[in-house]
Structures are given as structure tokens and as C-alpha cells.
Amino acid sequence: MSGEVKNINWIEEFDLLKCCVIIPTYNNEQTLVGVVEDVKAFTSNIIVVNDGSTDSTGQIIEGFVGVDVVSYSNNKGKGYAIRQGFKRALELGFHYAISLDSDGQHYAKDLPVFITNIKENPDSLLIGSRFMEGKDQPKSSGFANKFSNFWFRVETGINLPDTQSGYRLYPIKALEKKKWFCNKYEFEIEVIVRSAWKGIKVDCVPIDVYYPSQEERVTHFRPFKDFFRISVLNTILVLLAFLIYRPKLIFREFKGKSIKEIYNTHVRNSNETKGKIAAAIGFGVFMGIFPVWGYQLLIGFLLAHWFKLNKAIFFIAANISLPPMIPFILYLSYVTGSFLMGQGSWHVDTDLNIESISTNIKQYIYGAIGLSIIMGGLFFFFSYLILSLFKSSNRQNA
């Protein structure tokens, strides 16, 4: 730390930010006292959560002065302990909480890094990214971190260097109304993924880390059981990401914007090939007509993302189903269904509406599917043709 940082009164800074330190502990009698004493040099806002320890932790905690304690008899898991710490911190009026492991891995000297960064980025969730060079890191821990980083990127689109670190600053006030489901180690994955989905910025800050020798190391991570739990959670989160979060994120991006704004931002300067542009247009028209009313954009955005099509172009094209166009789409769908079912009639009642179509729902569904395929194909073909002619004309003029 620089001289300027050293001269800062960190106890006041913690109080001004309404920030505390939560230390979950389970059978860490050898290191707990040292961790708490180190933290006291920076803040007196300390909550120790005794997660059903069976060693002398209970007696050690009784000797703490000025430390808030949450304790229960049965071991529930790290996630449950952190959640109980959140609950107590909110009761005490704190807005932020820094979680710090009690095994001595984390250095209290890094607490100012979190405080400095949260002042610049309020209501963010900050993860302490561990400096691993020259450290005696277990191979399993390195693999687990890469595994976690990969799935976090899949689930949120955010690339972070260290999603496994337990040294974190949580914006607990911003997360106050969230309901959590995990109690074990997998909670640390759930909380960062669902925070990102909520729109909370998740970022990393640099910290140091201490890995004791193999003989001194104490870990409560159960390789098979806990890794299995984490794998199940990631499977669920990936499904939710592709079914709900990703489409929701795209909706949020386009919500309230005019088609002109979307075109200028996402299409005008696009480097897409003419085939990709035509495919996005054709697919947008297809989904705009396809008979899944109310879900066209939701399903379409998901598939456009899957097939790596320009979502803005898709969105503009899908607006073929705007209210003024709906009567024409219903009429053509009904007529197309008539021809597909062998009746071949262009006659439709003039009072055509959803209620009247419901009497011949099969004809409408067949027709809407057929019409969506025909129109999607036609728009793809003519878009590709026009784009080809336009680019050819530009080359000649150049």
C-alpha cells in the first residue's frame, strides 16, 4: 500500500460505507483467533458465524470482545453460514459484507482493496482474485477454479479470472430480497450467477493468498459430494440461462428503443455477411408469423443466439407481426391452411378474428406454420438478392 493508503482511517471507512466482515468458521481452532485479530486492525464490524464446530471454537469465541457471534449446534455448510451472516449483518444495519475464510488463507491487509473498489463501483459484487504465482496451490483447486470460471462465463457471458475465491464483498442491501437455495460450497456459485442475472456488476479485485503446506492444510471440501452438488447446480443454471436469462437480457437491451435506434446501433455498422443478414431477416419474419403468439420474441431470441444470428436484425424483421399487420397474417394463415388441407379456398369471413379461427384451429395452425416457412424463405431469398446487388453496385461505383 502507498503512504496515502496507509494513512487512511479504515475503521471510519468501514463505518461510513456500512460495511462489515463475516467470518464463517468450522473447526478452525488453530487459525480463527489470528484471523479475527488481523481483521480488527481494519474494522470492529466483525460477525463470526460458528457453523456447528466440534472442536474448541465455541470456547475461543466466548473470549472475543466486540465481535458479533452467530452460532448453532449442527454443521450446515459454508453457504448456510454466509447466509446467516448476511441476515445478522442486515439486522445490524450494514449495506455491505466482506466474507473472509477463517483458515488463514486470506490476508486482512487486502480488505482496503475491496473498500477502495466499492467506493468507485457502488452495489457491485467483488471477488478477490488470488495471485497464484509461486503458491503451493493444490492441483484440484486449480482445476475447480477453471471449471467454475468456464461455467460462469456460459451462464452469464462474463469472463472472470477467479470465481472460486471465498474472499468477497457482497452488496447485501441490494441482495436483501433475494431468496437463496444452496447451503454448501455451491452457494458461492449461486450467489454470483444470480447476482449477475439481477443486473448487479460482478467483478474481480487483486488479492494475495496463503496456501499452507500439505501437512498443515485443513479443508472441509469433500471432492466427490461437493463437486457433484456443484455440477448439478451448474446444469440447472445453464438451462435457466438459455431459457430465461439470455432472452431477458436481450429484451432489456432493446426495451424502449425505436426500430430506428436499434438499426443505427446494431445494424448500420454491422460487419455481418450478406448471408447472415439475410438469414436473420428470414428467421425474424418466420418467427413473427409462427403460431406461438406472445412467445415469438422469447423463443426467437433464444434460437437467434444459438445460431449466432444478428439479434437486432432478427428483432426488426420479427416486427412483421405488429398490430396493423395481424389481420393480414391471420387471413393469409387461414387461406394457406385451406390450400394445405386440400380445400383451396380464398374465401374468409369478413369478421375474421381469433374467436372465429378457433372453430377451425387446425386449419389456422397448419396455415400459420406453412405461411411462416414460405414468407421466411421469400424474405431470405429477396434480402440476399438485394444485398448482393447493392454490394455489387458499390464495388462498381468504387
Image (tube, rainbow, N blue to C red):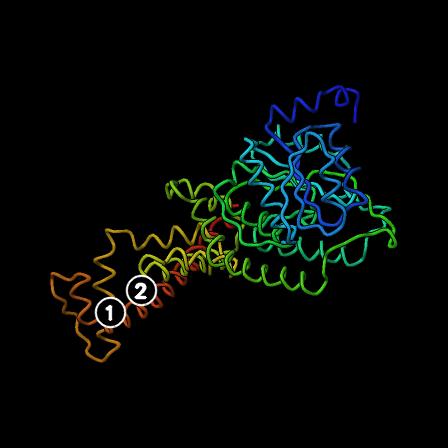
Q: In the picture provided, is 68 more to the left or to the right than 326?
A: right
Q: Circle 2 is placed at which residue position?
A: 291
Q: In the picture provided, is 362 more to the left or to the right than 57?
A: left
Q: Residue furthest bottom?
A: 342
Marks 1 and 2 in Cβ contact (< 8 Å): yes
Secondary structure found at label 1: helix
Q: In the image shown, does 296 or 154 lie closer to the viewer?
A: 154
Name the kind of residue labelled 1 in the image: Tyr
**Neighbour tally class for label 1: few under 14, some 14-19, many 20 plus, Cα within 10 Å:** many
Residue 41 image label: none
Secondary structure found at label 2: loop
Residue shown at 30% from the left, 55% from the top: 321
Residue shown at 17% from the left, 63% from the top: 355
Q: In the picture provided, is 1 more to the left or to the right than 327?
A: right
Q: In the image shown, does 109 or 269 lie closer to the viewer?
A: 109
Name the kind of residue labelled 2 in the image: Pro
Residue 30 falls in image quadrant: top right
- Which x, y percent locates residue 67? 68, 33
Q: In the image shown, does 345 or 123 lie closer to the viewer?
A: 123
- Which x, y percent locates residue 373? 36, 68
- Which x, y percent locates residue 210? 82, 44
> Can you say whether 70 is above or below 188 in the image?
above
> Can you say whether 78 is above or below 345 in the image?
above
How many labels, in total? 2
Q: Circle 1 is placed at which residue position?
A: 364
